Image (cartoon, grey):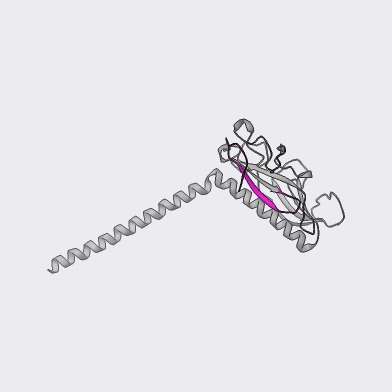
Amino acid sequence: MRRLHGIFRQWDRAMTLVELMVVCGLIALLLTVMAVHVRSAPYRLKTAVLQLRSLVQRARLEAIKNNKNVYLDFDAEDDGVLDTVVLWIPAASGQSSPVYQIGRDVSLLSEVVFAPSGTGTHRPTLGAVPASQGGPSVGAPRDGGTLPEDGVSFSGNRINFNPDGTSSTGTVYVHMPRHPKAGTYALVLNNTGRAYLRYFPTGGAQWEDR
């Protein structure tokens, strides 16, 4: 009887170890799947677009809070390279087209968000998947329009938010040059300062609201 009890107790202990190994295996599998997903092109593309939308929302709030014009600039250095997004407030008010100057103007944020357009890279890049590869042939706004070559249709490659929260109008397009199947995202901003996202699946027929 004691011998049988000892056998059952060893069996219970063995089952516990097996269960622990199964749980550890499942956790490792889930971590692997999550790592692959995070590194995937669609995930990185969507993350970049959501980051951009967050910057746009912050710029609008800063304009209202400070009661001043606030700019979200895609080419603050005016060198034709659109990769670093600068959120800033001009020191002098009343200028129609102020030029950002380090040390004079107030820089709230400066981040390299995108790879320059026209480069073959695995990073999110300004612009849209070419129509020849199944990308859009018309703009993302609901009234259509043309696609800008550099991916930003805002005048001067900057978004201007007024103290009352209104803004300049335009669209920013983002895609993955090395992964065209990830599609094209567009952030559209109307004159009320409200932004909405649209998505064009590569090979699709039209823009979709997101």
View extreme (right): residue: 94
Q: Quadrant of residue 166?
A: bottom right
Q: In this picture, is 130 found above or below 40? A: above
Principal secondary structure, stretch drawn in magenta = loop
Q: Residue furthest bottom?
A: 2
- Residue in view at x 66 percent, y 34 percent: 137
Name above or below for residue 167 compared with residue 201: below
Q: Is residue 169 magenta?
A: no
Along the viewing direction, whichever of 9 and 191 lies nearer the viewer: 191
Asked whether 157 or 101 is in front, the reply is 157
Q: Check residue 202 for magenta coloring.
A: yes
Residue that protrudes farthest toward the front in the picture: 143
Quarter of the picture holding the N terminus: bottom left
- How far across and how far down the image is residue 17, in percent? 30, 60
Name which residue lies at 29% across and 57% down: 18
Q: Position of residue 8 (x, y in %)?
A: 19, 64
Question: How many dots with numbers?
Answer: 0
**Residue 73 pos. (x, y %):** 75, 49
The residue drawn where x is 60% and y is 36% is 205
Q: Quadrant of residue 129?
A: top right
The residue furthest left is: 1
Q: Which residues are magenta?
A: 189-207
